[in-house]
Amino acid sequence: MRADVYLTCFTLLALAPTASCGGDDSMTSEGTATTTGTTAPGTSSDPTTTTSDSDATTVGPTTAPTSTTTETTETTDPTTETTDPTTETDSATDTDVEPFCGDGEVNGDEECDDGDDNSDDGACTAACVSATCGDGLVWAGVEGCDDGNDVNDDACTNDCALASCGDGQLQMGEECDDGNDLDTDACLNTCVAANCGDGNVYEGVEECDDGNGDETDMCTTLCAAPSCVDALQSGAETDVDCGGPDCDGCLLGQGCTDGGDCGEGLCIDAACKVPETCAEILAADPMAPSGAYTIAGDGQVADFGVYCDMTTDGGGWTIVWATSGGDNQQPITGDAPVAGDPLAFAPFNLTRAQKVVVAGRTGEGIFRRSSGQWIKVDSALYDDQLNQNLKRWTQSVTITANDNTSVMGWIGYANYSHAGGGDYNVTMVDGPTCNGVTMMGVDLHSSNYLHLNCGCQRHYLYSYSANTLDGDGSYKVNTALGSWPVTATCTTSEGGGLALLAAMR
């Protein structure tokens, strides 16, 4: 219904409450409204009265003033002038929306707003805050990590980079990290502290570093060239700081390869040691000359000096006694030391204890004249009781002369009852003498000279000095053996005996 109709009806109702307003049927053909007359109080109206299509007929007198109709006609059509409520609502909505993070506009406290591109791995985070190292968010392509703490020695540094050797930061598992690519300073490129043996030369600290444990090459495990004072067996040394072409000789017990490596003793079985016999000396050095040497004692007997015969019958003989053949010289079993040169057949003698030491290390004995003839036996010249009181000993042996004539026989000694001789014998096999039959080489016919047979018989070597019974000996030969000739069948003279030496090997 038109607005002017509503207003006209409203006016009429205000003026006459009983009046009614028609619908579309009250409209004239030209669109002019037909007004039904208002019945004055006390009158009635015919409700069936209608207007024609052409003329508006008023039933009864018209009471509404003309101005009322004019006001009604000027009323605005609500369908054309009234604002569409839908349109008004949308406009209000668009105008009242609050800014928000993600709308693509930087508003309020926002540092940035990339709209739909906001994320926690870009330059602008989903919270519209600019990405920074330490915010706990990894900025893709810029940061390697971001753990949001200020600990610089964990897996993520304070520069938001993944911890790595060479970043200049010391992390767990690294010994050092100097942030450079030098392998010649205190910290290697592997973040391990430089040390001798790592194969890198630490400038100013190491002379060399070949990274191996070989002390015999040009660089030792001290990262220095071999030295005679480095407390190592280095370079060409045969033991620690000794031997070889450059260092002093080695001490006893140290290693060696030849005699020149030893400052003490000789190189025997690859060690510098005091030799035990002249045979050991000769084995260690086949060119060792005859002469004076020191051999080892046995724990009870100290090391002592001897002379070695390095030529007779292959050499290696340790000389224990010698006589010039004169008077008042020690017998073969004597105990008093004498220091002459036995190689020159000057008087020489070891103590009984020393003789026992040599005997315990040897298996052959020899007697050699100054004229060069000799006889040898396949046994040491003494047993281990020589140094004890009132001892005598005999031993069956093979006796060989220097022309290789060889027979069976006996050797023996007595360290008592030999004032007139008889302290030592080299004798034929048992047989008769002028006073019985020998037993184990001797007939024991006199207590003054136990190991001297009656008439000096059956002896390849004997001692006899019965004139003064002073305990010395004059050594002679009663029975020849091959190239070993007789000197005197039996004589008691003082002195005048053989110039002779006795030795063992």
Image: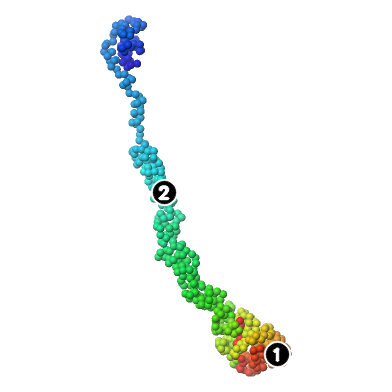
Q: In this view, does 295 lie above or below 17?
A: below
Position of residue 195 in the picture relative to residue 14 (left or right): right
In the image, what residue type sits under mark 1? His
Secondary structure under the numbered disc 1 in the rendered image: loop
For image coordinates 64% across by 85% down, the residue present is: 376
Foreground: 376 or 186? Answer: 376
x and y, in percent, of residue 12 in the image: 31, 12
Residue that badge 2 annotates: 144
First reached walking from the N terminus: tag 2 or tag 1: 2
For image coordinates 43% across by 53% down, the residue present is: 164
x and y, in percent, of residue 115 in the image: 37, 38
| Crowd rating for badge 2 (residues with CA inside 10 Å; few <14, some 14–19, many 20+) | some
Q: Can residue 115 be seen in this view?
A: yes
Residue that badge 1 annotates: 445
x and y, in percent, of residue 499 in the image: 60, 90
In the image, what residue type sits under mark 2? Gly
Q: Is residue 339 above or below residue 167?
A: below
Position of residue 61 in the picture relative to residue 434 (left or right): left
